[in-house]
Each structure stands twice: as structure tokens, then as C-alpha cells.
Amino acid sequence: MSLTEEIKKRRTFAIIAHPDAGKTTLTEKLLLFGGAIQTAGAVKSNKIDTATKSDWMEIEKQRGISVATSVMGFEYKDVKINLLDTPGHQDFAEDTYRTLTAVDSVIMVIDCVKGVEIQTEKLMEVCRMRNTPVICFINKLDREGRDPYDLLDEVESKLNIKVRPLSWPIGMGKGFKGVYNLYEKKLNLFTPSQRKLTDDRQVFENLDDPQLDALVGSGNANQLREDVDLIEGVYPDFDVNDYLEGKIAPVFFGSAVNNFGVNEMLDTFIKIAPTPKSRDTDVREVKPDEPKFSGFVFKIHANMDPNHRNRIAFLRICSGKFERNKPYNHVRGPKPLRFSNVTQFMAQDKEIIDEAYPGDIVGLYDTGNLKIGDTLTEGENMVFTGIPSFSPEIFREVVNKDAMKTKQLEKGLKQLMEEGVAQLFTFEMGQRKVVGTVGQLQFEVIQFRLKNEYNATVEFHPMNLYKACWISCKDKKQLDEFVRSKNRYIARDKDDKLVFMAESKSWLQMVQDNYPEIEFHFTSEF
């Protein structure tokens, strides 16, 4: 197959949601349809009868905090789908934000009982920064949830995006009868089956067909006719280009745990979702069909097992063809790198591959040369932009409990920060080291890993800080003056960029007002 044909075949997307909205359940059902697994719930175990619980912590326990399941590839109707399952838990939000830089579109899962939750809003902001196309899947219709119209209004107002339903539910909870596909004019009747695939779809060119009343009852049938008239009257026709530009989100209804409504969404998804897109670098825009290879690292995972110090770097391929054992230019590094151990993740199996194409995500076994944001090319010196680092929410000072192990601590902190577990800020005055994270859980992870992998013992002391702001100014003299006057609050991040550590929201506002020429940024591009 030619490069162009390989690119046309690929869809790379992430599933995002607030914890417990049913993200992992949906992921499993997509794998089931793709034939990557035979029975949902059998992603890890060979005891086919056990269905996985979609509870986030349970899933993590069951699969281990492993990377093998967070990137999955499968084929569906001749389309190669690369699916990234993101952690819903907000303590790992930073990881999710970075994952979003490596995909071309997003499926956002919303719980029909709880509606739009806070984590969903944060994730949507990240999608909007990049105009990522979003499909919305409203889940758990087998429960008594909120009115579909209310849910649509809430998505529009809270997520600040226009919506267009492409399927519509008939009833809800105990009275749930099925979903009508507005895009293909098909009715899918609901039969609760958690594990197997059923294909019971009726085609209705005309909703006045008396057959409809016989199938769902005349009350439901009349309600559906009214709803469809209202939707067609109120919402504009679905325009694929508006969706691709991130201006409108198509909405599907279903119940992932019962395998329902997922197929309609997947069938529509492969028709409308974007193929791999062009990406910006600091030099120029890179198009996927360019013959020369380029790609960037968006995630690194060092093994939790100290006996195997292997790290896997996740590389998103942006252009050309990636080949195993071929030397590639490591833009930041001193010498070219070649990779003999290159894996792709097919459901639960890692397999060694010889080549990969734009849109694909591959795992590179790395001994410590790569870090997040690194670019690999076939010779050109350029760096892919748009992999942000966000201002953390919680700050703690690192206190070394064993002065003899200072070197190990330095090394451990450096490697963990390169992996993107958290962010490290070193104050100019007194060289105090402060770790910033998005959630509480990360401090425990860092403490545990420093002890087990680097033999360094630390404690974290709370610090009264509100935000870390990266600072810049067109006039170097004014910047130097600001740094001098606020020296106590100036730190540097791991890339040696200047950061202003603000103690409170009101004080930050006052400093911004007093120094209008200084720019304060809440995200830093790597």
C-alpha cells in the first residue's frame, strides 16, 4: 500500500471523561467490535466469564498501572484504529492533557445521570486549545437519567460547543426501548446483552410506518416522531467540516455496559473522523504524506519494577514511514538513535513491528535518552510544538532525609520529572526544591519510587503557593528588573525557564497590575 493509502486508513483518537462515566467499559466494547477481544471483560484474564468492573481503581488493580493497555490498536472494517484510553482520575490529569496532543480526535463520554462534570470541562478546554474534533457519547441510558434535551443544553453551555444529535433515545431506564439513528435512519432495539454482539436493526425510511408502533408501542413511537421533527427543526443539518474544525460535536446515546449504541457511533466515527492531520513545528508545518519520517514523544513510562530499568517512550508518528533499526536524528540529543525493540500495542498484546505510519503510536525501549516533547526526524532539525506543561495545583517542598544520598535524590528527581510524573521548581534564593503536581496521589508515587528505585528517602512539606507562572517580557531589562525585585519568589523549572511562584490569587493579580509589561503564562510549551 502507498503512504497515502496507509494514512487514509488510520484514525487516532482518545477516550476522555470524568471518572466513572464509563470510559474503560466503552474502550472494551470498541475492542470487542474490532474483534481484538472475543468477550468484553476478557481484556486481561483468560477466565472468560468475568466481566471487568468499569471502576477506575479496580481496572488499575486488575491490569496493573501498566502502559500496555493505555494504547490499543485494532482493525475495524478495513480501518486501522489507534485508541488511547486516558486516566479519568484528576490526579493524573497532566498525563491525559499530554495524550490529547498525540491524537487527531476525541470521544467524550458523559454520564446521563450526572451530566457534565468538572473534569470533563477541564479536558474540553484542552481540546479547544487545539480545535480537536469531539464526538460526544451520552452513556448509561439503561438507568433513570436526565432528560436528553437538558443534557444537550448542558453540554452546549458548560463545554461551550454547539451540538447535533445523530442518534436519539426512545425512553430511558426501565422504559428504555432503543436508539434511533438519525444519520442512517435506522432503529436499533434494546436487548440487554453485556458481552456478545447482537445485530437487531430495523431500517425506517419513514417514521410513520405502523411497524414502528408495533415494535416500541404507540406512545413511544409518537414521542419519537415529535422528537425527530423537533431536532430536525431546531438543529442545523450535520456538517462534517464544522465537526472537523471543532465547531460542532455530534452526539450519540447508548449504554456501553450493555453494548448498546456503541456500534452506531463506531460506524459513524470511521466515516467522519479525521485521518492523521498536519502538525506544527517551530520551523514549519509538517504534513503526514511527506516521504521523510518525523514524530514526537508524548509519554514516557519507566517500569515500576526496579529489576528491569526499562523505559518505554511513546512516539506519535507525524509523517513518512518509521522503520525499525534505522538511525534517526534526535533533535535535542548529541547523536542519532536507532531502535531495535519497537512495539505496537494490539489490545492486550505487545508485538514487535518493523514499520509504522502517520497516526500510529509506537513504544520505543529507551535507556534514558528520550524525554517528553522530544522530536525524532530523518535529518531535519525541528521541534514539534504544542505539548504544554500546566501550572500545578499542589506544591510541596522536597526535604532530603539522608544527606549521604543527595546524588541519588538528584538523579531520581531528574528522571521522574523527565517522565512527566510532576514538575520540579528550584528557587533562585536558597536553592530550595519544590515539586508541583495536579493531585495528591502523585506525591505518594514519587516518594515510593525514589525509595525503591533510587534508594533516596524524602519527605514533602506543604507550601503556601497558589500558582507557578512562567514569565516573559519583550524588554530584557524590564524582565531582569522584575526578577531582581521579586527574587524571593523566582524559581527555575527543569528546562531552566524563569517561573514566578505566586502565593495567592489576589497577590498575583496585584503583581500583574503593577507590572503590565511582564507576561504571566499558566502553561509552558515544552
Image (cartoon, grey):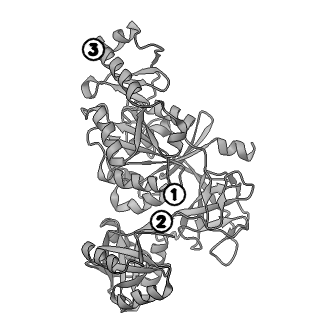
Which comes before the other along the chain, label 2 or label 1?
Answer: 1
- The residue identified by callout 3 is 219
Tell me the kind of residue under disc 3.
Gly
Residue 388, numbered circle: 2
Disc 3 to disc 2: CB gap under 8 Å: no
Query: Does 285 sit above or below residue 348?
Result: below
Query: Does 165 sit above or below residue 374?
Result: above
Residue 526, numbered circle: none
Question: Cα distance, mark 2 to mark 1?
Answer: 9 Å
Tell me the kind of residue under disc 2.
Pro
Q: Residue at x 67, y 78 (%)?
A: 334
Decide: few, some or many residues near mark 3? Use Cα within 10 Å; few <14, some 14-19, many ≥20. few
Disc 2 to disc 1: CB gap under 8 Å: yes
20 sits to left or right of 47 = left
Where disc 1 sits, the SS reads loop
382 sits to left or right of 2 = left
Query: Does 398 sit above or below residue 15?
Result: below
The answer to whether residue 39 of the structure is visible from this angle is yes
Task: Give x and y (percent) for residue 72.
Answer: 52, 48
286 sits to left or right of 246 = right
Task: Give x and y (percent) for residue 460.
Answer: 29, 79
Query: Does 97 sit above or below residue 274?
Result: below
> Which quarter of the figure is the N terminus placed in?
top right
Residue 101, numbered circle: 1
Decide: few, some or many residues near mark 1? Use Cα within 10 Å; few <14, some 14-19, many ≥20. many
Task: Give x and y (percent) for residue 390.
Answer: 41, 67
